[in-house]
Image: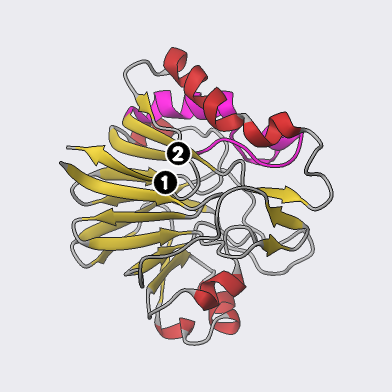
């Protein structure tokens, strides 16, 4: 019997159900985002209104305003400290729904604890934007302990997040210099898994969004990070098990 279920809707969009509480991470629900186009999987079909949305940082492929406006219901918005003012300007009704967290701070969503944890990633909205808030990840504690990393590179203290039941680890992107800009590639993702000591891991942040007009270029960068992560993890973290999901697939964490 599963105590926690996740559905991966591509990129970093995950529907997480734990102890009767539903959380949605960094939703991108559209087929197009600026110069990026959804290249794999169906458009996300949310099963209903989540209890809360976890937003890791201000980059548009994680804090996607049109998608946030389209999420049904009136979910709590858990955002990095300093991001609530931007959310209030961009999303109707967000001012009364935002909970700001910095690393080490936490909130409760019904019976589930959501704790902000560090991430090594640029916290600006964009290179010319004045909007800035420190990038974070989240550890969700209910029936399971689940780490959603957001975007991050390897950082000191990552091992202090574990042990975990499930790790949602970003392993790809769309540029050849990915690892130099506060991201994990497949190999570094496996090292992250080794450090956090998760029983299960699911790779995310790959294989979904791709620059318009480049669908046939560098296909290995688009298709391979998830399976490659599983290969590297088998060597780096042999006590962990990896489940590579297809877009829209649901995985129940074994009890």
* Above or below, comparing residue 229 to residue 16 in the picture: above
In the foreground, 195 or 47: 47
State the SS at label 1. loop
Question: Pointer 2: what residue?
Answer: 245
Question: Pointer 1: what residue?
Answer: 249
Q: For residue 251, what is the image quadrant?
A: top left
In the foreground, 158 or 228: 228
Asked if the residues shown at circle 2 and circle 1 are in contact, with their CB atoms under 8 angstroms apart, the answer is yes
Tell me if residue 230 can be seen: yes
Q: Residue furthest right?
A: 213
Q: Is residue 224 left or right of residue 219?
A: left
Q: Residue furthest top?
A: 235
* Above or below, comparing residue 76 to residue 251 in the picture: below
Picture disc at residue 12:
none
Residue appearing at x 34%, y 23% in the figure: 240
Q: How many marks?
A: 2
Q: Is residue 83 left or right of residue 96?
A: right
| Span of residues in magenta | 170-198
User: Residue 110: image x %, image y %?
Assistant: 21, 67
In the foreground, 214 or 78: 214
């Amino acid at each position: 019997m599963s105590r926690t279920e996740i559905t991966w809707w591509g990129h970093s969009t995950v529907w997480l159900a734990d102890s009767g509480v539903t959380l949605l991470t960094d939703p991108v629900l559209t087929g197009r985002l600026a110069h990026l186009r959804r290249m794999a999987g169906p458009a996300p079909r949310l099963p209903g209104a989540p209890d809360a949305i976890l937003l890791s940082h201000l980059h548009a492929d994680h804090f996607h305003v049109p998608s946030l406006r389209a999420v049904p219901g009136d979910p709590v918005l858990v955002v990095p400290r300093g991001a609530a003012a931007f959310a209030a300007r961009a999303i109707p009704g967000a001012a009364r729904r935002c909970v700001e967290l910095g690393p080490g701070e936490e909130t409760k969503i019904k019976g589930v604890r959501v704790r902000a944890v560090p991430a090594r990633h640029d916290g600006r909205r964009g290179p010319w934007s004045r909007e800035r808030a420190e990038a974070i990840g989240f550890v969700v504690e209910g029936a399971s302990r689940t780490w959603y990393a957001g975007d991050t590179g390897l950082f000191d203290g990552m091992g202090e997040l574990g042990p975990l039941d499930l790790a949602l680890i970003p392993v790809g992107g769309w540029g050849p210099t990915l690892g130099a800009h506060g991201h994990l590639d497949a190999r570094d993702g496996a090292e992250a898994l080794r450090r956090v000591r998760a029983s299960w891991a699911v790779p995310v942040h790959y294989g979904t969004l791709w620059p318009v007009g480049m669908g046939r270029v560098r296909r290995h960068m688009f298709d391979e990070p998830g399976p490659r992560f599983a290969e590297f993890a088998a060597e780096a973290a042999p006590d962990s098990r990896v489940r590579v999901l297809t877009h829209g697939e649901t995985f129940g964490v074994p009890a």
